[in-house]
């Protein structure tokens, strides 16, 4: 219920009471009850560009800009996007590319990447007419960096902030060690995409649920998921969830992609946190995974940097050692059941692994760009085996590291 309340508040701020009526306040989750986006067109040049999206009915919107990188964010009530394939992959004029998708229950978002600074000249939704459907219209006009930042400062007070993450499932007196399972990406942030259209966010969510069920079977641990559906969770909130739950372990699940130019890598890799990446490939991957917030239109400057001080430093050193010990156990377990990357244990600066007091690892399950890996990733039997091995590694690690989780604890 916390989620529902949070999104209600968000929408009320976002679009006024009308949005609530249009959103999931309607009890029945029938697809027909949501507005549908059916087409999108870009027009203009690099001084003046238009973004036009056809909609099945009129909706409210809230548009604002973000810097570094330059983006325009349009928040709208939950919409079903039925746009032509490849919509948003390329741009025109001031628009480099755009993404769209669910941001949270009841709220969707469009994020437009800009080629250079631009201001929002107009942002509105036109009523349907006899000839045309309702249309969301965004008119952008080129500006310079100084003007862009000045406008941003003025906007700041009215910017919509995401609601705080819903409190993780309460412990309710349950004192068992907590394992946080973190399916990467979600909502507007799809993660990698296989050539056939399979999305990382869906693959890892399904596997995460299997892993949760598998860990539950031990009876020794409490599992907290960072998400259980297709909504977006900022990276910092995932870290927060782990810290608030005083987790003993954090496991993030992902699936990698390499373009043909980069070769055809294959197999699973286990990553831990370090400020210096093992190799350029690991550094690039961390950069990609860290883009989640940029993709979803989060203002990176508004993210608190709560990691400071010598105590944190000390905690980190121990956390790092523990993380590496867990990663070793994980690689050993995975070896038996799936193909591993030629270099299966690496480290890099993943923001989602940054809790100073929670040992953490990020598993790239395989490459959606590799035919054999994708076949595995899409197989229910393979997912079950992976969930089983990861759960065994978690149990092996916690049995020797956490009081109360020993082999005789059940
Ligand atoms: Zn990922």
Image (tube, rainbow, N blue to C red):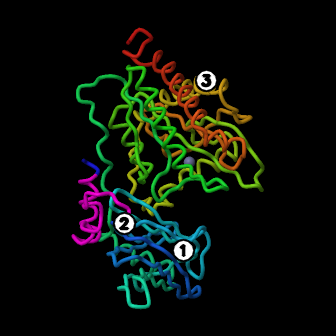
Q: Nearer the viewer, mark 1 or mark 3?
A: 3
Q: Which residues are magenta?
A: 4-31
Mark 1, residues whose alpha carbon is within 10 Å: few (<14), some, or many (≥20)? Answer: many
Q: Nearer the viewer, residue 160 or 152?
A: 160
Q: Nearer the viewer, mark 1 or mark 2?
A: 2
The residue carrying mark 3 is: 333
- Magenta stretch contains residue 13: yes
Among the two numbered marks 2 and 3 on one chain, the one whose residue lies closer to the N terminus: 2
Q: Which secondary structure lies at badge 2?
A: helix
The residue carrying mark 2 is: 32
> Gap in Å between the C-alphas at discs 2 and 3?
46 Å
Corner quadrant of residue 377: top right
- Magenta stretch contains residue 222: no
Q: Nearer the viewer, mark 2 or mark 3?
A: 2
Residue extending farthest to the left is 17
x and y percentages locating residue 208 in the rendered image = 48, 38
By secondary structure, the bulk of the magenta-drawn segment is best described as helix
Q: Which secondary structure lies at badge 1?
A: strand
The residue carrying mark 1 is: 114
Among the two numbered marks 1 and 2 on one chain, the one whose residue lies closer to the N terminus: 2
Residue 258, relative to residue 117: is it above or below?
above
């Amino acid at each position: 219920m916390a989620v529902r309340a949070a999104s209600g508040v968000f929408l009320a701020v976002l679009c006024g009471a009308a949005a609530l009526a249009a959103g999931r306040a309607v009890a029945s989750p029938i697809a027909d009850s949501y507005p549908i986006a059916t087409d999108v067109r870009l027009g203009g040049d690099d001084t003046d560009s238009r973004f036009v999206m056809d909609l099945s009915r009129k909706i409210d919107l809230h548009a604002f800009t973000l810097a570094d990188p330059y983006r325009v964010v349009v928040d709208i009530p939950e919409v079903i996007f039925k746009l032509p394939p490849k919509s948003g992959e390329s741009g025109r004029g001031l628009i480099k590319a755009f993404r769209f998708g669910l941001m949270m229950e009841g709220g969707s978002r469009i994020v437009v990447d800009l080629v250079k600074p631009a201001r929002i000249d107009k942002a509105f939704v036109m009523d349907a007419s006899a000839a045309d459907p309702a249309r969301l219209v965004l008119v952008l006009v080129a500006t310079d960096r100084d003007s862009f930042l000045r406008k941003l400062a003025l906007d700041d007070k009215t910017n919509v902030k995401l609601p705080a993450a819903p409190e993780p499932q309460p412990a309710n007196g349950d004192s068992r060690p907590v394992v946080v399972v973190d399916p990467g990406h979600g909502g507007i942030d799809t993660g990698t995409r296989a050539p056939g259209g399979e999305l990382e966010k869906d693959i890892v969510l399904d596997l995460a649920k299997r892993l949760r069920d598998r860990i539950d079977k031990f009876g020794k641990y409490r599992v907290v998921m960072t998400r259980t559906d297709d909504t977006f969770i900022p990276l910092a909130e995932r870290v927060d969830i782990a810290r608030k739950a005083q987790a003993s372990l954090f496991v993030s699940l992902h699936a990698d992609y390499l373009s043909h130019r980069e070769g055809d890598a294959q197999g699973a890799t286990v990553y831990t946190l370090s400020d210096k990446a093992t190799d350029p490939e690991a550094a690039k991957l961390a950069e990609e995974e860290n883009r989640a917030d940029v993709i979803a239109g989060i203002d990176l400057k508004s993210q608190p940097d709560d990691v400071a001080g010598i105590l944190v430093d000390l905690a980190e050193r121990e956390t790092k050692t523990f993380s590496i010990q867990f990663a070793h156990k994980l690689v050993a377990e995975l070896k038996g059941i799936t193909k591993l990357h030629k270099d299966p244990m690496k480290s890099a600066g993943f923001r989602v692994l940054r809790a100073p007091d929670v040992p953490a690892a990020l598993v790239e399950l395989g490459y959606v760009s590799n035919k054999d890996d994708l076949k595995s990733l899409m197989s229910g039997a393979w997912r079950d085996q992976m969930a089983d091995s990861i759960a065994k590694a978690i149990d092996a690690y916690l049995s020797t590291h956490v009081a109360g989780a020993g082999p005789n604890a059940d």
